[in-house]
Amino acid sequence: SKMYEEAIDFQAKMTEQPPLRSRMIPTINLGTCLRELARYKEAEAVLTRCLNEAQSEFSDITLDEHLYVRALTALAALYQAQSKYEAARKLYEKAVPIARNIQESKSSLWLAGNIAGYAETLRKSGDLPQAESHHREALEIRTRAVQEKSCTELELAVSYTQLGCTLAGMRQYEDAYEQHHRALALRYRYLDFSHGLVSESLNYCAESLCALGRGGEGIPLALHAVEIRKLIFGTSHPAYAHALSVLASCYHAVGRSFDARDCLEKCLEICEVAFQKNHANIIPNLMNYGNVLRSTGDLVKARIVYQRAITIHQLNFKRGQQASQLEKCKTELEDLSRKIELLESSASSATNNLSHAPLKVPFAPPDIEDRGTPVIVFTDIGRDVDDELALVVMSSLRRMHLLNPIAVITTLCPEESRAHLARGTLDAIGMADVPVGVGSSGGVDSDVELEVYGADYSRASPCIHEDGMGLVYRALESVPPKSAQILCIASLSDVATLIREREELFTTKVKEVILMGGVVSLEAGEALIPDSAYNNNCDVSAARFVYKKCQELGVPTATLSRWAAYGCPIPPQLLDEIAKSEHMVATNVRGVSKLSIDQLWNKVILHPADPRREKLPSRCDINWFCRTFMGTTEVSKDWTSSIWSHVKKLNMYDPLAVLLCVPAYRSTHFKWKTKIVNGVQHIVVGTSELDTGICNRLSLYHEYATLFLTAFTESLHKEKSSFL
C-alpha cells in the first residue's frame, strides 16, 4: 500500500496531469490493498473517490469500459467485506453485464473473476442457488482457460474454493469437502506451504470435515492454518480470527469445549476491533461461541451471546435473507431460556458453576476389534525427539486400527510443560481425542528442572488432566480384562505408583508391560533386574519395584534395550525427508534434533561427577558418543563447536518400543531372549552389542520411516508422492 501511495503522490506533483487510466490504476490497487489489510474506512474513501472521478470524466463516447468495471468491482468487493451486501450487489449488477459485452473470449480469467465476485456477494447475502450457478459458470470459464493453456490449473483452485463455500452453505458437505480438497491439492502442488492461499484451503477443508462429523481430522489442518495466518497477517487480522474460529469448531466437535471457548474468545476479541460495530461476519462466531458456552454449562452467557447474534442479524439483513441463520439463533435462544427458567424454578445455583473447570468425560469401553489394542503411554516427551516420534508412529498405527492409545501421561520434571508439548503434538497429528495427564517428577528432585525443548504448537490446555494417575485408573477401568498394554518410554516412577496403589486393577486389566530400558544379563539370577539405562536410572527404586512386581504378579514384560536402537540407526537425512512434509511437528523435530545432539555432546564431555550431566549414565562418555553417532572412536581436532555436521547416524529408541507393542511387527522385525519367571514369559530385545535383536535393519528402518511419513502426510491430507 505504501508503494501505491508513493506513486499517487508522485503523480499529483507532476506538472502535466497523467491520463485518467494512469491515475486510476494505482488508486484502485491502493484501495484493494487497504481492504485486504482490513483498513476499511480508508479503502472506502479511496475507492469511492476513484469511482466518482471516473464517472465524472468518462463520457458515453470515451468510456473506458474495462477500467470502469475495475472501479465498480473494487468498491463492490469492499462493500462485500463490510457486509453491505445490497450496495455490493448493485455495483456488480452494473459491472458484470459490461464485462460480458466487452469480453468475447469464453476463457477470459478477467470475466471469470467478475462473475465469481458477483457470486460471492450472492452467497454472503443468502442467495445460494444463484451463487452456485454463477460459480459453476466461472469454473467452466477457468477450465477452458486451462485447457487452452492460457493459465495454469492453479487458477481452478479459486473456483473450487468459492464453489465449496457455496455448497457448504447449502449443507452439501460432502461435495463441499471435495471441492475444497481439490483446491488444497492444487495449492500444495504449486505454492509454498506458508502461502496464504494454502492456509485458506486448510481452513475450509477443516471446516468441511467438522461439518461431516470428522472434526478430529480437521484439527491438524486448522492448527497449520492458524500458524500460517499468524505468520502472514499477524494476530489482529480477521483472517487469523477466522482460522481460530474454525479450530474452535473442530475442538468442540471432539468434545474439547473449553479449548474451543478459549479460541473463540480470542477470535471475537480480534473481530470487535477489526470490523465495524455489529458487522455481519461476527454472527457465525457468536453462534459458535454460544454453542460452546452451552456445552461448558454457562447457559446465561450463552443466551446473551445468541441474543446479540439476533440483533446483529436484524441490523444487516432484510427479511428472508440468511433466514436459516436467524431461525437457528431464535431456536437456541428459546431453548436456553426454557432451561434457565427450569433451573431457576428448582432453586438451582449451578447455572454457571460448570464454566470454570473441564468436565470429566467418562471413558467409553474401547472396541478392540475395530480400534486396536488399548495402550497407556508414559513419556518424558521434550527430553529428546524420539518420544515425540513415538507418538507419530502411534498415530499411524492408530489409523491402521492396530493400537488405540487411551491415555498419555507425561513424567519427569517439569511434567506440566511436557504435558503441554504432548497435547500439542497429539492435536497436530490427528489424536486430539486422546487424553493427556500430568504424571510425577519421575524420580527427579523437586528443585531440579530438566529441559523441555520448545515447539510453537505446545499448548496449555484446559483439557489436560492434572491428576495423571487418576486418568490412568479411569482408562484401565474402561477396558476388558487382560486387554491393555502399558508402554513406558520414560522413568518407571508412575508405573510403580500404579502397581502400588491399584495392584488388583493392574493385574486384572494389563496384559503386558513394554519398557524402553534394559536389564542385566539374563543369566544373572532367577529374575530380571533393571540395568543402568537412562529410564531406569531416573528412579532406580521404582525400576526395580516394577520389574520385581511384574514377575511376582505374572504380568509379562517386553524390554527393548539401547542395543536394539543401536542395531537400527537412522541417517540424519530421514529427518530432512520428513521435514519436506512441512508438517509443524516434522519441521520442529528436524530443528530440535540438531540442537539435542549438540547439547548431548556438551554433556558427555563433562566429568562423570558433574551435575550438569543430569541423569546421563557414566558410560556415556566421549568414546561412546563417537561410536554411537559417528561410527568412529577418534575425536578430530577439526571439529567445531557444533557437532551436528559430523553425525552419521541417530538412534530411534522409543519408536521401536511402539512397534514392539504390535504382534505382527514384533514377530517380523525383532528377535528376543526369553526368561520364564513363575511360568510367565518375559522377553528382552537386544542383550549386547553383538545381539541387537534386530532381524533386518533396512527392513525395519523402511517400516518406521514409512510410518513417520504416513502420519505427517495423512494428517495434512497430502499425497506422499508429492515429496518422497
Image: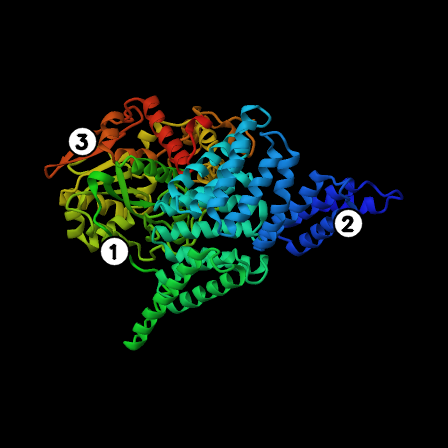
- Residue 66 appears at what percent x and percent y? 69, 38
Residue 719 vs residue 640, the one in the foreground: 719
Q: CA distance from mark 3 to mark 2?
A: 93 Å
Q: Amino acid at mark 2?
A: Ser
* Residue density around tag 2, few if under 14, some if 14–19, many if 20 or more, within 10 Å: few
How far apart in space, not on screen, are marks 3 and 1 (Cα)?
38 Å
Q: Is residue 319 left or right of residue 9?
A: left
Residue, far front? 60
| Earlier residue among tags 3 and 1 | 1
Residue wearing tag 1: 362
* Disc 3 versus disc 1: nearer the observer: 1
Q: Residue at x 45, y 49 (%)?
A: 246
Q: Is residue 302 left or right of residue 560?
A: right
Q: Residues within 10 Å of mark 1 (few under 14, many from 20)?
A: few
Badge 3 density bin: few <14, some 14–19, many ≥20, Cα 10 Å: some
Q: Residue furthest left?
A: 679
Q: Which residue is mark 3?
A: 674
**Residue contact at pointers 3 and 1, CB within 8 angstroms:** no
